Image: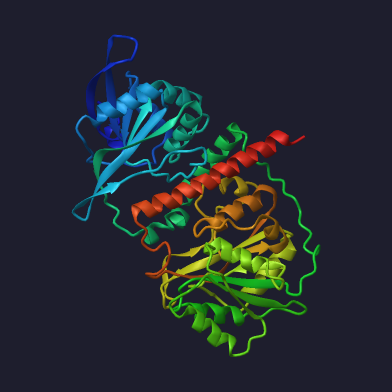
Amino acid sequence: MLKNAAKLGTFLQVCKYYHTFAGLNQTLTMNIQSFNIAGRLCSTNDLKNIVSQVNTPYFILYLKEGISWVHYAQERMLQIIADTDAAMVYSDRFQEKNGNIINAPVIDYQQGSLRDDFDFGSVLMINTNLAKQVLLQTQHQYQYAALYDLRLKLSKKGQITHISEYLYYEKELDLRTSGEKLFDYVDPKNRTVQVEMEQAVTEHLKEVNAYLPPKHKTVDLTADDFQYEASVVIPCKNRVRTIASAIRSALLQQVNEPYKYNVIVVDDNSTDGTVEAIKEILNEGHPNLIYIPQDTTYHAIGGNWNAALHHPLCGRFALQLDSDDTYSDTYTVQRFIDAFHREQCAMVIGSYQLTDFNGNTLPPGIIDHREWTDNNGHNNALRINGLGAPRGFFTPLLRQWNFPTTKYGEDYAVGLRVCREYRIGRIYDVMYNCRRWEDNSDANVDIEGMNRNNLYKDSIRTWELKARQSLNNTKP
C-alpha cells in the first residue's frame, strides 16, 4: 500500500499477464502495478514516490476514479506497449454522460502536442524504466506540472502511442459545453499552475532545439504607402442577427489626425439575410465601408481574411472584429495604431470581456492573457491554445504569408508565424466584447469536432516546432 494514500490516491490492483514474445518461444509473466492519482496536477515528489514503489516493467496511472475495463483490455494495452517498446500508451474510451454511454475517442500524439490539457483519456500505461530515468534526471520540483513534465520528457525517450480501440469506461463529471470550458486555462485562479506549465514547456523546447531566445526582428512601419492607416476586417457568413451591430461598432471608431481608417466586410456567400443587412448599412452612405462578396469557391475564415488583406484599400494595420462581437468603445482602432507605432511590432493583441448576447458580463470576465511576456511569450505560445483577441496585424507581412484557408485555428497559425521572428505587442485594456451565444462556432462542439480542431492545432504546432528547429540549425 502507498504510505501517503491520502495524497497520492489508492493502490488499486495488481494484475498478471502472460505474454509470449514472438521468436522467443517462452512465456514471460509480468505484473502491472496501478495507481490512482485522481487528477492531472500532481507534484514531482508525488510521482517520484509512486515510481519508487514500482518493481514491474510497466505501471498504470488512473487520472479519474471509477474506471471499468472492457474484457481483456489491460492485456491488450500491455501487448501494445510491449510489442512497440513505447514510452507510454493510451486509448479511446466510452463515457457515461447524462445517463448515456457515448464513444469518446482521443487523437494521435505528435511532436506538436504540447498543450498541457491534451486529452489522453483517464488511463495511462507507462514504461517504468523510462519513467524512473526521467524522474531521476529532472531538475525541477513541480507542485502542479509534474505529470505534464513527465510526458514531455517521455516523448523524447520513446513513442507516445494512441491505441485507437475502446478499452475502458469512465464517468464524465464535467457536463459543461465546450464553449463553457474554453476559457479555463486563462482563468486568473489558475495562474500559478500556468507558470509551472510554462517552465516545463520552455525546458522541453530547449531540449529539442526549438527554443527561441528573446531577440526579435524590427519592422519598418513606414516602408509602404497606405491610403488608410488601419482597416477593421469583419469576415462573416450567416450572421444576420449580429452583423449590423458589429459593423456599426466599427464605424463608430474615432481616430486622431492625420490617420484614417476603413471597415472591410467580407461575406462568404451568406444565405440568411446577412447580405441584405450589410447592404442596408452601405445604402446609408458610409464612404469608409467596403463590402467584398466572395465567389462560390471555398474560402472559410482564413480565405476571407486574405480577400481583405489583398484589397488595394486595406490599411497598414488589419484589425480583427468577429461578426458576432463588438468593440467595447470608440477608441479601439486608435489604441491599436498607437501600440503598433509605440512598440514597433508586427502584431498587437488586446484584451476582451466575455458577455452574453445582450452585453452582460459572463465568468470568468476579462480575458487578458497576462501569462504573455516579451521574453518568453513566443515560446509559451506553443503550449497554449490561443493568443488572445482582438488581434491586429501588420499588413505587408500578412500579404507575404497569408492566412491558412481554414475556418478554425487560422489566427493561431498566423500568431505563431509572427512570433517566430517578430514581437507581438499587448494591450491589457478591454477593447472587445466577446459575445457568447448559441450560434458561436465553438459554443457546443461535439467530441469529433473537438478532436478535429485539436488535431489541426497540434499539426500547426508540429509544423512550427520543425520550423523553429530548422531556424536554430541555420543560425550562424
Q: Is residue 370 visible?
A: no
Q: Residue furthest bottom?
A: 284
Q: Residue furthest top?
A: 25
Given residues 304 and 334, the one toward you in this image is 304
Q: Is residue 324 left or right of residue 6?
A: right
Given residues 293 and 127, the one toward you in this image is 293
Q: Residue furthest front?
A: 296
Given residues 476 and 106, the one toward you in this image is 106
Which quadrant of the figure contains the N terminus?
A: top left
User: Quarter of the image holding residue 165?
Assistant: top left
Figure check: 138 above or below 424:
above
Colour logic: rainbow
Provide residue 368's location: percent of width, then percent of height: 54, 61
User: Quarter of the image holding residue 219?
Assistant: bottom right
Which quadrant of the figure contains the C terminus?
A: top right
Q: Residue at x 53, y 87 (%)?
A: 280
Q: Is residue 153 left or right of residue 391?
A: left
Provide residue 53's location: percent of width, then percent of height: 33, 22
Q: Is residue 221 visible?
A: yes
Provide residue 333's location: percent of width, then percent of height: 65, 73
User: Quarter of the image holding residue 69?
Assistant: top left
Provide residue 86's location: percent of width, then percent of height: 41, 26
Q: How many marks?
A: 0
Q: Residue at x 69, y 33 (%)?
A: 473
Q: Is residue 220 left or right of residue 191?
A: right
Q: Residue at x 61, y 81 (%)?
A: 251
